[in-house]
Amino acid sequence: MEKFKPINSTAAPLAIINIDTDMIIPKDYLKTIKRTGLGKGLFAEMRFNEDGSQKPDFVLNQPAYQNAEILVAGDNFGCGSSREHAPWALLDFGIKCVISTSFADIFYNNCFKNGILPIIVSPQQLDMLMEDAERGSNATLSIDLEAQSIKGPDGGEIKFEIDPDRKHRLLNGIDDISGSLQKSAAIKNFETSMQQSRPWI
């Protein structure tokens, strides 16, 4: 997992509540266990017509937002099934940070495991960020995980909370596997101790 670095990017506004994981990545794209290549299916039913052509009114199809690394979304983002393909698709598309007033628990946890920063803000703060995002390429947001801050295009700043361990893991690119490997010596010592004290196991 790559280390999470400061972001300075346009933010795509998606003012829809209860965006579930099937909307994020439809079930037709769940046949693979690879984390790459899923960006093409991100929000597929909202992005594309039946003939495969893009819907010009969908935010991520608009020129100002095609390279957005931040998504500002409505309440309860990532609800529905627990598919890990949802954060995979977001990251493969280029989205590194999602801002909302709340997230489904499993999706929220999966974001941290895959290098995406989910930020929880108040409804009032979300309204301000949504207004900034709607300005398109005329406005960018800056996300600084180390400082736990969001800076708007006009100099405003919003501080956000994050679990210290999750912050450490994102900043250092530590996923579950690498986190376990860092504790390999302690695990080996524990196994040796167990074998000595309980040889029948």
Image: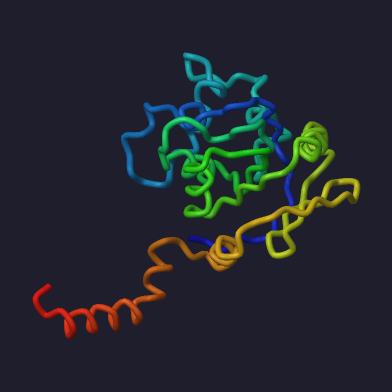
Q: Position of residue 183 (x, y in %)?
A: 39, 75
Q: Quadrant of residue 100?
A: top right
Q: Residue at x 66, y 31 (%)?
A: 74
Q: Quadrant of residue 167?
A: bottom right
Q: Residue at x 35, y 80 (%)?
A: 186
Q: Position of residue 138 (x, y in %)?
A: 84, 39
**Foreground pick, 77 / 152:** 77
Q: List the single residue furthest toward the front.
A: 197
How are the residues colored?
Answer: rainbow
Q: Residue at x 67, y 30 (%)?
A: 14
Q: List the single residue furthest toward the right.
A: 154
Residue 128 in the figure: left or right of residue 83: right
Number of disc labels: 0
Q: Position of residue 11 (x, y in %)?
A: 72, 40
- Tell me the quadrant of the picture where the C terminus can be found: bottom left
**Foreground pick, 180 / 61:** 180
Give the answer, above or below, for where 149 lies relative to 180: above
Residue 72 in the figure: left or right of residue 190: right
**Foreground pick, 39 / 109:** 109
Q: Quadrant of residue 192?
A: bottom left
Residue 54 in the figure: left or right of residue 195: right
Give the answer, above or below, for where 6 lies relative to 96: below
Q: List the single residue furthest toward the left.
A: 200
